[in-house]
């Protein structure tokens, strides 16, 4: 029995609230169990120097955790003067994941930045950030279309992410913190609604996991993101 009482193939309760940040061009508050992440998209009429005069846009992300998102207070990274390696790795992952489903030649020379701020952390924050950021990005593109900044929506599909793990030698879906901290193996799967794989991050925490266990996690991840894609579709239809 999992600590949460969920079946091995069950997601935590998921909700996506679009338009939560009223001033952003696109935003979404995602709740996955007790994990909550606010994703806000900001549009700027410029691109990084390496893209100037290319006719292409850019999609990037920043990620952070509020000091009391976890059980004990963590120091603000701004107070330390630099971001941790973990923060940099996660925000690069979010940016890569979103760019995988964007035709940047349809954006013009515009940058969309996704700010993903963790309000409450109970495992799976990077996965929630990717899933919620897609909604915020989609709404920002719709705003750009309405304002005649772009002529067509640059999105080529959905992207979402979910964690899986091995507990008691069995694959399980969507780890919360209690499971993540004690799992025999854990992995994050970033997948598209066309069946593509954007990224897989997998680690054995004790002994090595087997190919069969990996394939079991992948199968659960595909099942889980199918539910997330439907939640994304419903979220953007409400605005």
Image (tube, rainbow, N blue to C red):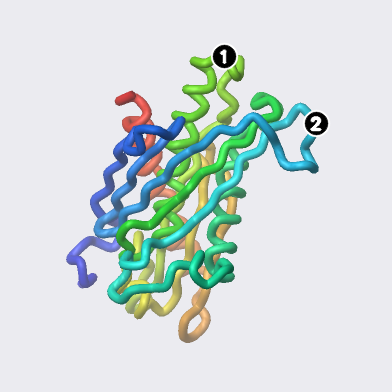
Horizontal and vertical percent position of residue 71:
28, 74
Report the quarter where the N terminus lies.
Answer: bottom left
How many angstroms separate mark 1 from mark 2 (CA)? 20 Å
Other-residue count near label 2 (Cα within 10 Å), few / some / many at <14 / 14–19 / ≥20: few
Q: Nearer the viewer, residue 155 or 8?
A: 155
Horizontal and vertical percent position of residue 226:
39, 42
| Vertical side of 232 occupied by 9: above or below | below
Look at the numbered disc 1 and give the secondary structure of its residue.
loop
The residue under label 1 is: 148
Query: Quick check: 48 left or right of 97?
Result: right
Q: Quadrant of residue 237?
A: top left
Query: Quick check: 224 left or right of 88?
Result: left
Look at the numbered disc 2 and give the secondary structure of its residue.
loop
Query: Quick check: 61 left or right of 174?
Result: right
The residue under the point 60% across, 45% down is 60
Residue 54's disc is 2
| Vertical side of 133 occupied by 83: above or below | below
Residue 84 seen from this side: yes
């Amino acid at each position: 029995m999992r600590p949460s009482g969920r079946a091995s193939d069950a997601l935590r309760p998921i909700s996506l609230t679009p338009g939560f940040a009223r001033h952003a061009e696109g935003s979404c508050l995602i709740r996955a169990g007790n994990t909550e992440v606010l994703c806000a998209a900001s549009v700027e009429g410029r691109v990084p120097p390496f893209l100037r005069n290319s006719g292409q846009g850019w999609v990037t992300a920043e990620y952070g955790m509020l000091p009391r998102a976890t059980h004990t207070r963590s120091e603000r990274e701004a107070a330390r003067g630099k971001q941790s390696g973990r923060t940099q790795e996660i925000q690069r992952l979010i940016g890569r994941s979103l760019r995988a489903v964007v035709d940047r030649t349809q954006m013009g020379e515009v940058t969309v930045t996704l700010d993903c701020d963790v309000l409450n952390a109970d495992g799976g924050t990077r996965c929630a950030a990717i899933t919620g950021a897609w909604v915020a990005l989609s709404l920002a593109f719709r705003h750009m279309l309405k304002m005649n900044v772009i002529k067509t929506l640059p999105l080529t599909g959905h992207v979402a992410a979910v964690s899986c793990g091995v507990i008691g030698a069995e694959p399980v879906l969507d780890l919360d913190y209690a499971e993540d901290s004690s799992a025999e193996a854990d992995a994050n799967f970033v997948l598209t609604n066309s069946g593509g794989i954007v990224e897989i991050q997998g680690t054995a925490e004790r002994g090595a996991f087997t190919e069969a266990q990996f394939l079991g996690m992948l199968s659960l991840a595909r099942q889980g993101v199918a539910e997330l894609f439907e939640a994304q579709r419903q979220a953007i239809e409400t605005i």
